[in-house]
Image (tube, rainbow, N blue to C red):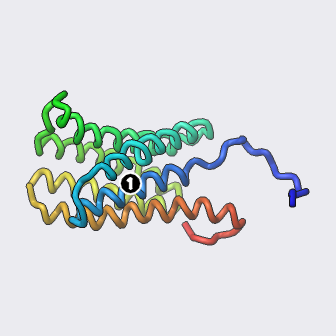
Amino acid sequence: MIPTTPVPAGDGIANPAPLGLCAFGMTTVLLNLHNAGFFELNSMILAMGIFYGGIAQVIAGVLEAKKNNIFGLTAFTSYGLFWLSLVGLIVIPKFGWAPKPSEAGMCAYLIMWGLFTLFLFFGTLKLNGALRFIFATLTILFFLLAAEHGTGNETIGKIAGFEGIICGASAIYTGIANVLNPLYGRTVWPV
């Protein structure tokens, strides 16, 4: 049956946030299942990092720009490129194009991403609680991973893995809430 009630046209662009949040969340959960020790680093994680965590988030960020959402543009595009750069750090040395980063280099990389995420966290104070939780747990995750690389303590890496699973799961939850709530016209999953 075709609806007869007119629907406002809006800006003609669907909300890209669920795509970006789910891409970030699912890729983060999978990588952190590895960090927690459940399975090895493999092509499944790298492919997710390139295609879903990487490319899909960049697409979501570009669509956020079209919606004039500076926060969404900055976050999704940056984290999409984070995933692509992380895969590059793993794959480039295997091709012999550049040496593997040192532990100190990885520590610096992760600290920079942790600081960037902390700064974005302050933007979430004007947004909803679900986004505050995602950015708070992501900030903690980056600093835990930096501590693992800085100290060589594998236990910190395992703790980071479990914390990262929580972070990624919260992003998936928020992404799906952003699909279901408008679809049902009410709060199905609170954010």
Would you say 31 lies left or right of 176 here?
left
Q: Position of residue 90 (x, y in %)?
A: 22, 42
Would you say 147 lies left or right of 167 here?
left
Would you say 187 lies left or right of 25 here?
right
The front one of 101 and 50 is 50
Looking at this rendering, what residue extends furthest in the right direction? 4
Q: Position of residue 49 (x, y in %)?
A: 36, 46
- The structure residue drawn at horizontal position 30% and vertical position 65%, both measured from the top left corner, is 163
Q: Position of residue 178 (x, y in %)?
A: 59, 59
The front one of 111 and 92 is 92
Q: Which quadrant of the structure image shows residue 184?
A: bottom right
- The structure residue drawn at horizontal position 33% and vertical position 52%, both measured from the top left corner, is 44
Task: Identify whether 15 is placed above or below 34.
Answer: above
- The structure residue drawn at horizontal position 91% and vertical position 56%, both measured from the top left corner, is 4
Q: Residues within 10 Å of mark 1 (few under 14, many from 20)?
A: many
The quadrant the C terminus occupies is bottom right
Q: Position of residue 100 (x, y in %)?
A: 14, 38
Would you say 2 lies left or right of 174 here?
right
Q: Which quadrant of the structure image shows residue 134?
A: bottom left
The front one of 81 and 70 is 81
Q: How many marks?
A: 1
Residue bearing mark 1? 27
Task: Identify whether 63 is placed above or below 153.
Answer: above
For the residue marked with disc 1, what is the amino acid?
A: Thr
